Image (tube, rainbow, N blue to C red):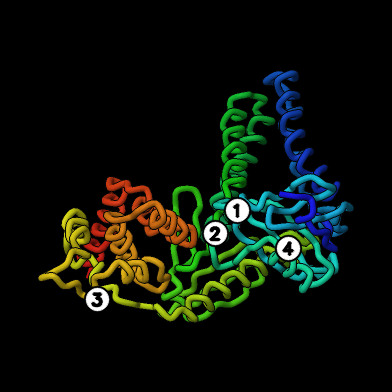
Amino acid sequence: MSEAEFERVEARRLGLSKGSKWLLGSAIAFPLLTGLLGAIAGAGSVAAPLATIAYLLALLVSVGVGTKKGWFGLAAQDGVVEVSSAGVRVDGKLVADRRKVDNAAVVRDERLGGARVLLGKKGSPRRSLALLAASDSEAHAIVKKLGLDPNASTSTWATMGGYGYAPWGLWAQLSPLLLAFPLIFMAAVMQSVIPVVPAALCFVAFYALLFSKTHVVVGADGVLVKWLTMQRFCSWSDVASVERLTNGVRLVQRDGAHFDIKLATEQQVRNDRLAVVTPEIEALYTRVREAMNARGAASDAMVASDPFLRNDRSARAWLDGLRTLFEPVGGLRSSAHTEESAWRVVSDSAAEEEARIGAAAALANNSDARSKERLRAVAANVASTRVRVAIEAAAKGDEEALVESMEALAKEGAERATKK
């Protein structure tokens, strides 16, 4: 990529403030120091338990005061920002490679006085880069220069802990901490090392759950929320409207149920001087609205999906039937059984999951290199794990993975029929 192709833009890179770096450093260093103190002082000393309690109280106070004073969060950094179709450079160094970035969001930032450009990594909730432009128009110009289409791939967000997955997730991650305090006091009173071991395990469990991220994946077909081994998927076809919550987004489903996607607690947002969470929530809300509008504008919705449905067949019989779907009958080929109709169904985010998987399986039998690349591009825009895995398997020609996806769908269909 030649030097001339990079163009300087009026924007500044956003990075962690000094206060945020000090907070992260102390949160890691002090537990190690208290553990070392406990090892030196010995089992009969109360120094380590008291130091642990003091550390936790000091951490809570520093977070509260620092948040109120605005010490934490992102800060604009000086430097020359240049943009091209190859990515973003700051002071001549490539800080965001376009090949590793597949989505972007533009949101207003009243605190810093401008518009943020949030660049997302492929298949990851992490941000490749955050820029601060002077205005919305300049921010959108940066996205355009990068050649990013918000509806050409999935976009991913993440929250710490499980509260983003379900209301009980917050209590699940706090429960080990609540159990640790009685154990620490017990160790101090008894002057015994025995309660220290389960207390230490409680702290490990707390931090493990605290840093176990809830992933939110928004695609053309719907939104997927994942935490640990659990996941929930909501198709856009089931959504009647979308609402902006204080701490996230609410999808109001057609049956009246609510599907909430939370990126923070309400208290965190209300006291948000970090100026980190609020723009991410706004970006999520914008992305959800874009995906729903794009689906509503699609002209191929619910097109010719019947030939690709399972119709109570086993996964193997379903696959065998799809393999012969495009073969001429009596020298003629039905217009409903063409490869073009399969492409329309597999690419249609409004089609049923079963029909999209069936269309992908039908195309897998005759896919050349160009068709496989086209299938991979379709899979990149799918949030549903089951559909994405099936389309990727079809692109790879992996019959075993494809059959597994079809069997899982057939099993779920049988279970639903049994419950009725």
The residue at which mark 3 appears reads as 335
Q: Is residue 39 above or below residue 248?
A: above
Specify which label sits upstream in the sequence, 4 or 1: 4
Label 3, residues with CA under 10 Å away: few <14, some 14-19, many ≥20: few
Where in the figure is residue 319, as x and y percent of width and height?
Answer: 21, 57
Numbered badge on residue 117: 4
Q: Secondary structure at mark 1?
A: loop
Numbered badge on residue 125: 1
Give the mark toward the camera: 4 or 3.
Answer: 3
Residue shown at 59%/29% (left/top)?
Answer: 195
Label 4, residues with CA under 10 Å away: few <14, some 14-19, many ≥20: many
Specify which label sits upstream in the sequence, 2 or 4: 4
Numbered badge on residue 216: 2
Give the mark toward the camera: 2 or 4.
Answer: 4
Disc 1 marks a residue whose amino acid type is Pro
Q: Is residue 239 above or below residue 129?
A: below
